[in-house]
Image (spheres, rainbow, N blue to C red):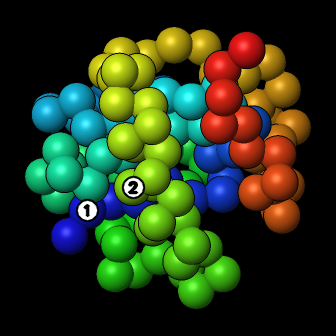
Amino acid sequence: MAYIVTEPCINCKYTNCAAVCPVDAFREGPNFLTIDPIECIDCDACVSECPVEAIFPDDEVPEEWEHYIELNERLAEKWEDRVINETFDALPDADEWAEKTDKLDLLQEEWD
């Protein structure tokens, strides 16, 4: 089992979760974080650190976000060289985006 980052992270990208990961499983995208399922050791440390409650065990991801399981795996591979393991400032409008829904179309996969 691995942990999965879901939709609430889009356009927020709080990094508290990445800073507590003991195995550097987090990968950073332009406006989203993902967890490498191969690196994740299922320790649960990241879940309570996420202020937008975006992280779930892969077998407890809400049905409407199950597609994030494949998305985390694909993006973790794509961003394999973008390991994040410390806390950085969230995106500038993170607090405004935290409660918004239906954000998948805003996810940026490519760095400028």
Q: Which mark is residue 73?
A: 2
Q: Amino acid at mark 1?
A: Ala
Q: Using the image as rendered, state which of residue 82 and residue 97 is in the foreground.
A: 82
Tell me the SS state at disc 1: loop
Question: Where the C terminus falls, by quadrant?
Answer: top right
Where does the image place residue 50, in percent across and percent down from the top left?
48, 44
Q: Residue at horizontal 45%, vertical 37%?
A: 78
Q: Residue at horizontal 14%, vertical 34%?
A: 23
Q: Residue at horizontal 57%, vertical 73%?
A: 67
Q: Is residue 5 visible?
A: yes
Give the residue number, with chain letter if any, for mark 1.
2
Q: Amino acid at mark 2?
A: Glu
Where does the image place residue 45, in percent across and percent down from the top left?
25, 46
Q: Label 1 neighbourhood size at 10 Å, few (<14), some (14-19), many (20+)?
A: many
In this rendering, the answer to whether 102 lies above or below 110 is below
Find the distance from the CA under tag 1 to the CA under tag 2: 10 Å
Q: Is residue 34 visible?
A: no
Toward the bottom, the furthest residue is 63
- 61 vs 59, left or right, is right
In this rendering, the answer to whether 62 lies above or below 25 is below
In this rendering, the answer to whether 106 lies above or below 3 is above
Tell me the SS state at disc 2: helix
Whether label 1 touches label 2, CB < 8 Å: no
